[in-house]
Amino acid sequence: MSTLLHILSQKFQTAILSAFPEWDPNTPLPLEISQSTQAQFGHYQCNSAMKLAKVLGAKPRDIATRIIEHVDVNLEGIRLIEKMEIAGPGFINITLDPAYLSQKLHRILLDSHLDIELPQHKQKIIVEFSSPNTAKELHVGHLRSTIIGDSLARLFEFLGHDVLRLNHIGDWGTAFGMLIAYMKQKTPHVLDGTEKTDLQHLVQWYKKSKERFDSDADFKKTSQLEVVALQGGDPAALKAWEIICDISRKAYQEIYDLLDVKIIERGESYYNPMLADTVADLEAKGLVTLSDGAKCIFLEGFQNREGASLPLMVQKSDGGYNYDTTDMAAIRQRTLEEKADRIIYVTDAGQSLHFQMIFQAAEKAHYLDASKVRVDHVPFGLVLGSDGKKFRTRSGETERLIDLLLAAVKHADQLLIERSPEMPKEEREKLAKTLGIAAVKYADLACNRTGDYTFSYERMLRFEGNTAAFLMYAYVRVAGIKRKINPALKIEELKDPIVLEHPSEISLAVHLAQFEEALEQVASDLLPNRLTEYLYGLAEKFNAFFRDCRVEGSPQQNSRLQICEIVAKTMKQGLSILGVQTVERM
Ligand code: ARG
C-alpha cells in the first residue's frame, strides 16, 4: 500500500533508527504517525518523541530535533515534505509539499483506479449479509444488514479482492412443517402451482398455522409428520417447500433490485447435508458434552444471567439440528472448502454472543485458524422511530421494507417538485428514485453502525449537512462547471501542470490524496461511517475551494479544472462504494 500514512511511517522509522543507533532492535519502535486534525498542526503528526524520550532518558524536544534532522524529505526525486515543526512537548507537525501533491493528483487523474494499487495477493473474502427468513418479510434490521453488507462487499471488490456475497436465508427448519400442513389443507392450489400468491399472504398463513399448531393437537401431529417428510426428502413436501421459498425469494428480489444489491442465495438449507457429519466430527474431536440429552459444546467465558455455563447446542435431544449446528457447518465449509481468507457476518448486535461462541468453537474444532483467517461479526444497532422507540409504521405493525423504500422515493419526489417545479416529470421521477434510495442508504451508513439510529425521511433528504443529497450535489456542481466551460473538453488530456497555491486548494489536494487511507481504515475496522465522513469532508473542502478559487476564466483554469475532475472521480467512486449513484444534474 502506498498511502501517505505508510510512506511517512516508513520515512520516520528509518529516520529514528538512524538518529538513535543505540536503540535496542529487539524493542518495538513506538512509531506514531497520524493525520492532523487541524490545519495549524500541518497535514500529519509524528508523536513518537515523547515515548522515545522515556526509554532513551532524554528531553522529548531534543529527540524530535534529532528525528527531523534524519528525515529524508524527498520521495523518488520529488519533494514530499515541505516543512517539519516541533510543537508542544515534542510533537512533530509535518506539512506536505505542493510538488508532491501535484504529482499525486496527476496520477489519480490519469488512473482509472485512482492510483490505488491492487493487492499482490488477492484475498477471498466472504461477506454474509441481508439474510432474511423465508415466509417472513424483510424488516428494517435486514435493511441495515443489506446496506452495510453491500457497502463492505463493494469496498473489497474495489480494493481488488475476490468477494463472495452470501445471503444466509433462514429457509430451513421445523417451522416449515406447520406452514406446509396448513397450506395443504387451506390453499392446495398454491402448492400444486395452479394458484399464484405473494409473500404477504404467506406471512398470514404462517401466523395462522402457528396459532393452530399451538391450539390443535391433531394439527400439531400432522405438522410434525410434515417435518419428518421434508427432512426425509419426500418429493411432495420438498415441492411445497420450494414453492414457499420461491414466493419469498420474489419479494426479496424486488427489494434487492430497488436497492441495486447483488447477492447470492445460500440459505441454511444449503448446509443441511453437512450437519450430521459436522456433529459427528465435533464429537470425534471430543468437544461435545451431553446435557439433558442434547449435544452441547461448552466454551470458556460464556454464561447466562444466572451465571450458569451457556453452551452451543449442536443437536437437540429429539435429534434435530438448529441454528448453531448450521453455523458450525457453514464456517467449516467456508474455511475448508471455500478457502476464505476473511469472513464477515453482518447482523444485528443481538447476535454478538452467538457469533463469539461460533468463532471460539470453530477454533477449537480446527475449522478456523484465527492467525490465518480473519472472522468478524459486524454488529449494528436498532432503527428507531421519531418517538425513540423501535421503528414501526402507524398501524403498529413492523414496517414492510418495500413500503418504507417506496415512501422514501415519494418523499424525494415531493421535495423535487418544491425545489425544481420546472423539471420534466419523467426526469424528476427518475431522479427521485435515485435520491430516495441514496438517502436511505447514506443515512444508515453515516452513523456509527454500533449505535441505534433514528429514521427520519425529512432529515435524510436534506440538501445541507452530512446527507446523500449534499454529496451528490457536489458532484453535480463539478459536472455543471465542465458543461459551462466546454462540454467536449477531455480533462485528462490537458497538459497544464496542476498548480497548488491557495490554502483551500492545498487543503483539498491533501484530502484527495487521502482517499486510499479512508478506504484502508474501513477495510480494517469495518465502519462505513469513516468513508461517509471522508466524503462529507471532501464536499466541504471542495465547496471552500470553489468559493476561494475561481475556475472559469481564471489564469489557473486548466489546473483547477483538473482538480475539479479529481474531486468528481473521487466522489463518484466513494459514493459507489456506499452503493449510492451519482447524477449529472439535480
Ligand atoms: N436469518 C437470521 C435473522 O434473520 C440472520 C442470519 C445470520 N447469519 C448467520 N450465519 N447466522 O436473524
Image: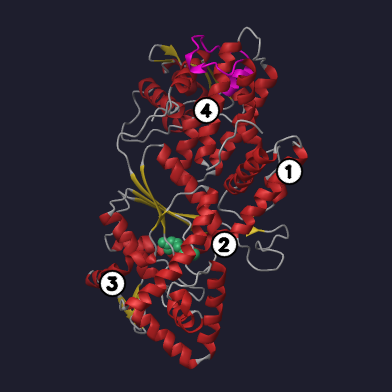
Residue 504 lies within the magenta run: yes
Comparing labels 3 and 4, the label whose residue is closer to the camera: 4
**Is 463 situated left or right of 90 in this image?**
right
Cα separation between marks 3 and 4: 51 Å
**Is 119 situated left or right of 403 in this image?**
left
Cα separation between marks 4 and 2: 34 Å
Q: Which mark is residue 43?
A: none
- Secondary structure beneath label 1: helix
- Secondary structure beneath label 2: loop
Above or below 369: residue 138: below
Q: Could you tell which of marks 2 and 1 lies nearer the N-terminus?
A: 2
Q: Which three-letter amino acid code belongs to the residue tagged 1?
A: Leu
Give coordinates of residue 190: x percent, y percent: 47, 74
| Location of mark 4 (residue) | 569
Q: Which three-letter amino acid code belongs to the residue tagged 4?
A: Lys
Cα separation between marks 2 and 1: 26 Å
Q: Could you tell which of marks 4 and 1 lies nearer the N-terminus?
A: 1
Give coordinates of residue 56: x percent, y percent: 42, 29
| Location of mark 3 (residue) | 279
Give coordinates of residue 470: x percent, y percent: 66, 36
| Location of mark 2 (residue) | 139
Q: Is residue 90 visible?
A: no
Which residues, given as a range, are shown in magenta? 486-511
Above or below 185: residue 487: above
Q: Which three-letter amino acid code belongs to the residue tagged 2?
A: His
Cα separation between marks 4 and 1: 27 Å
- Does the CB distance between marks 3 and 4 fall below 8 Å? no
Comparing labels 2 and 1, the label whose residue is closer to the camera: 1
- Does the CB distance between marks 2 and 1 fall below 8 Å? no
Q: Could you tell which of marks 3 and 4 lies nearer the N-terminus?
A: 3
| Location of mark 1 (residue) | 415
